[in-house]
Amino acid sequence: MSEMIKNRSEILFLYDVTNSNPNGDPVDENKPRIDEGTSVNIVTDVRLKRTIRDYLHDYKGKEIFIIGEIDDKGNLKTKEDRLNYFKDKDLVKECIDVRLFGATTAVKERTMTLTGPVQFKYGHSLHKVALTFVKGTTVMPSKGGLAQGTFTEKYILPYSLIVFYGIVNENAAINQNIPLSQEDVDLMTEAIWNGTKNLISGSKFGQIPRLLIRVEYKEPNYYSGELDKRIKFISDKKDEEIRDIAEGVVDITELVDSIKEQTKAINCIYYRVDEHVKLQYNGNSVHIDNILFPDIKLEVLNF
């Protein structure tokens, strides 16, 4: 394992969904989560962490503690089952998700409470969304004696452009003796992008990563905050009528100006932009490469 992280980072992640359910609410008919006061789509941090965990396990072969596994009887394994699996091992060193997100367990004689060095706010759409109810039928009956298939019903969003904001807190790792490494952070960054793209399921197919920025600071205990509030999606269409990223521009004026004000505190900006995203700064079309950060190192994320 590489050396423990020494630098704090902020993460800004933008992705969109088309005709899918980015995060269903199990206590409300699994509808996409929507703020009733603003009609803005909400996605929990748990959903993004699940995306990261699944990618790290399924595509990178990493050991994950919080994972849905089935036992020989077809039942989901419990936390106790997972703890028993790791009984002779150091759970923190073995499981990358514990090093990233922490863990809370209280099973018999084993108790552990770790605050994860990596934390995300709830994600939210940059515009109002239109909840759509879809009905269909299945070819096969649900049980014997029926002459035809059953009806299917689900709620989807025709479109939602969602932003997440997170922090990698080096102090949380150091103070709790969590050996979070730079390699772990790099893998998580990859998982945010590629994990979102690889959510190919009935409810999640249609999710595309659009913009990912990780601002790494050299100043200790320093971060800007609220990067998710420093970008806007501007479109000529009404919010609920938007159906594609091409129907608007992502305005990064406030984000860029904030970064410029903190140049001396920043070590490096890592980024990736989808080719279909149109960025705007001070009313002009730009690419991140074209924005002048004379004293800040920029590095493209290649994965």
Image (tube, rainbow, N blue to C red):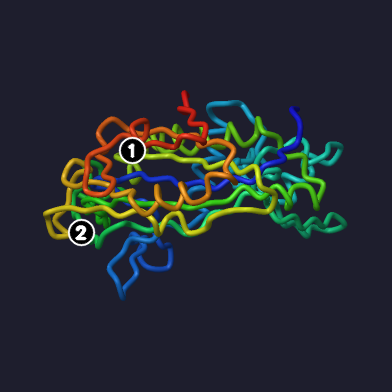
Q: Is residue 284 left or right of residue 96?
A: left
- Number of residues whose C-alpha sits closer than 10 Å to that of mark 1, classed few (under 14), some (14–19) or many (20 or more): many
Say which of 55 and 122 sits in front.
Answer: 122
Quote the CA–CA distance across marks 1 and 2. Answer: 20 Å
Say which of 31 and 138 sits in front.
Answer: 31
Quadrant that contains the N terminus = top right
Residue that numbered label 2 is attached to: 132
Residue 141 in view in this figure:
no
Residue type at tag 2: Thr
Can you give x and y, in whole percent of width and height, for residue 3 in the image? 76, 31
Which residue lies at the image location 19% right of the left edge and 55% below the top edge?
134
Q: Is residue 254 left or right of residue 56?
A: left
- Number of residues whose C-alpha sits closer than 10 Å to that of mark 2, classed few (under 14), some (14–19) or many (20 or more): some
Residue 300 in view in this figure:
yes
Up-down relation of residue 136 to residue 5 (above or below): below
Say which of 242 and 198 sits in front.
Answer: 242
Can you give x and y, in whole percent of width and height, for residue 286 in the image? 27, 37
Can you give x and y, in whole percent of width and height, for residue 15 in the image? 35, 44
Can you give x and y, in whole percent of width and height, for residue 175 in the image? 80, 52
Which residue lies at the image location 75% right of the left edge and 55% below the top edge?
114
Say which of 150 and 19 sits in front.
Answer: 19
Question: Which label lies toward us, 1 or 2?
Answer: 1
Residue at the extreme front of the image, as rendered: 294
Up-down relation of residue 240 to residue 199 (above or below): below
Q: Is residue 41 left or right of residue 240?
A: right
Residue type at tag 1: Ile
Q: Secondary structure at mark 2?
A: strand
Instruction: Assess whether mark 2 and mark 1 are in contact (beta carbons under 8 angstroms).
Output: no
Q: Secondary structure at mark 1?
A: strand
Residue that numbered label 1 is attached to: 208
